[in-house]
Image: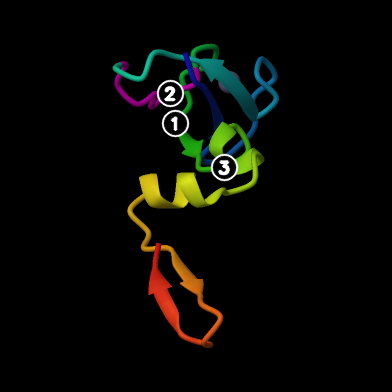
Amino acid sequence: MPLYEYELCDGSCAACGGRFTLRRPVTAPDLKQCPSCRKPVRKIISGFFTPSLLKPLSITDAKKAGFTVLKKTSKGEYERQ
Ligand SMILES: [Zn+2]
């Protein structure tokens, strides 16, 4: 299950400190309230927990992602690999 980070829309919360992380199934609806204090929360969009951002992007990954990979030929032109 992915880890989601939430913060209070406003105010503070003694139970969660105003910012907390929750492990939730992808299929679960967005959390709208702090589970402890019921104050409104918003999800923090962060790439920190995205594993694909942590490893270097290879040509294979780029191709899988739909990029066209161009290779410079000895003649100084670019061609599709
Ligand atoms: Zn709270």
Counting residues from the start of the chain, the first of labels 1 and 3 encountered is 1
Disc 1 secondary structure class: loop
- Name the chief secondary structure element in magenta: loop
Is any part of residue 50 visible from this angle? no
Between the C-alphas of marks 1 and 3, the distance is 22 Å
Q: Position of residue 42 (x, y in %)?
A: 46, 36
In the depicted view, which residue is nearer to us: 45 or 69?
69
Q: Is 5 in the magenta?
A: no
- Whether pointer 2 and pointer 1 mark residues with C-beta atoms closer than 8 Å, the reply is yes
Q: Which residue is mark 1?
A: 40
Which quadrant of the picture is home to ligand 1? Answer: top right
Q: Which mark is residue 33?
A: 2
**What residue range appears in magenta?**
28-34
Counting residues from the start of the chain, the first of labels 3 and 2 encountered is 2
Q: Which residue is mark 3?
A: 47
Q: Which mark is residue 20?
A: none
Residue visible at 39% across and 23% down? 31
Disc 3 secondary structure class: loop
Residue visible at 56% across and 42% down? 46
In the depicted view, which residue is nearer to us: 45 or 36?
45
